[in-house]
Amino acid sequence: MRNIVVGLAKAMSKTLGFEENYLGKAFELELGFDVSAMNLYPPNHVSKGHVGIGDHTDPGFIITLTQDMNGGLQILSHTGKWINVYIPHHAILIQLGDHLEILTNGKYKSHVHRVIVANNEVQRLTVATLHGPSLDKVVAPALEFVDEDHPPAYLGMTYKQSLEAKGHDEIDVQSSLDKIKLPSA
Ligand SMILES: O=C(O)CCC(=O)C(=O)O
Ligand SMILES: [Fe+2]
């Protein structure tokens, strides 16, 4: 998995117009910290209404998601519509994390997603792994993404701060972006 993360960091660095180690350095990825959360959704689960996990974004650089079957994951599109996510068998879904949004000053978005469970007739198991920067690296909008038309949209924060913001048991369902968003953004 590390190889995938490092490879994607190189590819994204180039897509953003920088040399291939740009994101690796910005996030200190050689010391990158990963956190996995396993989610088990029982069939026809309605104890919290239809929602298994409410609207959220995840901390980190990227998030990989593996699952035993499709059903329930939705991503909010830029037009405000919830889109059902179908992940092909044996594929890994790659999502962008909060720290990529912070570093790129909002150019790359950490997308809002949720899990709807009430319609699932069988149990679903997923493993979400947050691939982070190093724990103590303060990630703030990089100068390359800041100019007169794009003032800094976020304060800086470490990956550790965002993981600790809501406690260990909830690190998979929290977003820290609201806490560090600047008023002008
Ligand atoms: O189980 C899923 O489909 C998504 C889980 C998720 O978003 C998370 O653990 O942060
Ligand atoms: Fe998530």
Image (tube, rainbow, N blue to C red):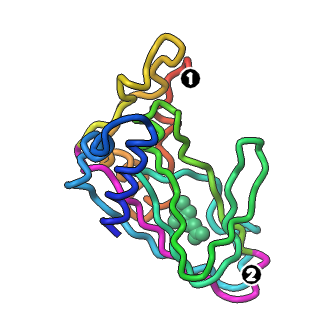
| Residue at 65% from the left image edge and 60% from the top image edge | 114
Q: Is residue 11 visible?
A: yes
| Residue at 65% from the left image edge and 84% from the top image edge | 42
Ligand 1: which quarter?
bottom right
Answer left or right for 123 relative to 63: right
User: Is 128 within the magenta?
Assistant: yes
**In the rendered image, the vertical position of residue 48 relative to residue 40, given as above or below:** above
Q: Residue furthest left?
A: 31
Answer left or right for 126 relative to 48: left
Q: Which region is colored magenta?
A: 118-136
Answer left or right for 12 relative to 119: left
- Return the disc, 2 or 1, that comes first in the chain's sequence: 2
Q: Mark 1 = which residue?
A: 185
Q: Amino acid at mark 1?
A: Ala
Q: Position of residue 68 (x, y in %)?
A: 57, 84
| Residue at 54% from the left image edge and 66% from the top image edge | 93
